[in-house]
Amino acid sequence: MTVPSFPRPLKQTDRVVVVGDTMALAGNRPHGFVTLLREALNYEEMPWFVVGRSTDRWEHASQRFAEEVIALRPTVLLVMLGLNDVWHQARGHVLEFEKTRCAILELANQFFQHAPQGVLVFASPFLIGEKSDGTNSLDRDLSAISDLIAEVAAEVHRPSHSDDASFSQVQFLNLRRRAVDYLQQHNPTQKPHSILTVDGIQLNKVGHKFMADLLADYFGLQLPAPATDVLRHVVFLKFKAEVGPAKTREVLHAFQALGKRIDVIAAIESGTNNSPEGLADGFTHVFTLTFHSTADRDIYLNHPAHQEFVQLALATLEKVCVLDYWAQSHPTTRT
């Protein structure tokens, strides 16, 4: 599904404020989606702000709006709320739709009182569970509040007073729909989490990149190409002294063969230690596997072919060391 476009070109003088809950706050962290958006090549000087609290519901944001948001003088307001309204309902809090509607309207009215030429973007809540077949326990409630936000956005519709009056200053962005579309392709086994989120709610690194790319498309931002987007899984092997060359070769060949047996492995390399420093601590062989996501890495770890290899190898190994990391490139004199 095509992502809609922001109704006008952003300007270097725009001030974008993201109002939200725990997801928005996480977006402000070093590798979060708001931080990635700040790096847009075509709007490097444009300020982005994040306002919110991890437990915020619509009524909380509306009540604190004048004190915490207006002072930032937003010209573009992106509101990412609704998830906690659903989450707390499942734990005893009654989700009052009319009260929530009033809170959304009040927030919109406050914004336009202080920024009559501004643009207000209401976003749907994202995910509570990553199954794409509608079987997450709160899917129906998330869809209901998404529909409510979309209805209010249409109700608040404000034709632009600028030269281009063809667009409304109130927009609705269905983040949930985009996430489900993505998960239908990337979560065929209907895992409850670990594709875009850590736990079904909190974005993981792939989720932050997904959100940044989606919002960059919406706002017309040109994000810098990532230096790298690969997860390395490095395995060091130290064989038992009594294991002979034939058994060692069998284990190494079996490890190498995993690259052809497990399709989520993007690349596999291996080698024998030849360092002159004497710091190998007895490790003699190393394998480096490359994955494009933590989900792919987890599929590999639980794959029957990998489990079969582990049973073969463990009987021959004195020690194993495993390190995983997101690869980062750094400047050199050859850059």
Image: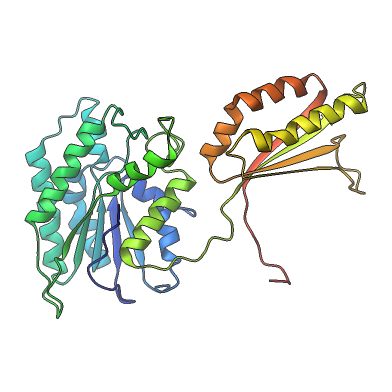
Q: Residue furthest front?
A: 260
Does 250 sit above or below residue 217? above
Q: Quadrant of residue 297?
A: top right
Viewer-closest of 192 and 52: 192
Please report the residue visible at 65 percent of the width from the left and 62 percent of the height from the top.
Answer: 330
153 in relation to 299, above or below:
below
Position of residue 207 in the picture relative to residue 252 (left or right): left
The residue at 9%/68% (across/down) is 159
Observer able to see residue 106: no
Q: How is the image coloured?
A: rainbow
Residue 267, given in percent of the width and then of the height, sits at 66, 45
Query: What residue appears at the point 45 percent right and 72 percent down from the top-left corner?
Result: 41
Determine which quarter of the picture holds residue 304: top right
Q: Please state the total of marks drawn on the protein image.
A: 0
- Quadrant in which the C terminus is drawn: bottom right
Q: Residue placed at 64% from the left, 26% from the top?
A: 305
Q: Which quadrant would residue 111 be assigned to in this image?
A: bottom left
Name the spot of residue 102 as percent of width and height, x first: 8, 47
Residue placed most toward the observer, 179 or 170:
179
Q: Please, which residue is most extreme toward the bottom here?
A: 163
Position of residue 200 relative to residue 103, above or below, is above
Instruction: Classify 134 as above or below 124.
Output: above
Q: Nearer the viewer, residue 158 or 99?
A: 158
Give the x, y percent position of residue 8.
24, 72
**Where residue 270 sits in the image (x, y, percent)?**
78, 42
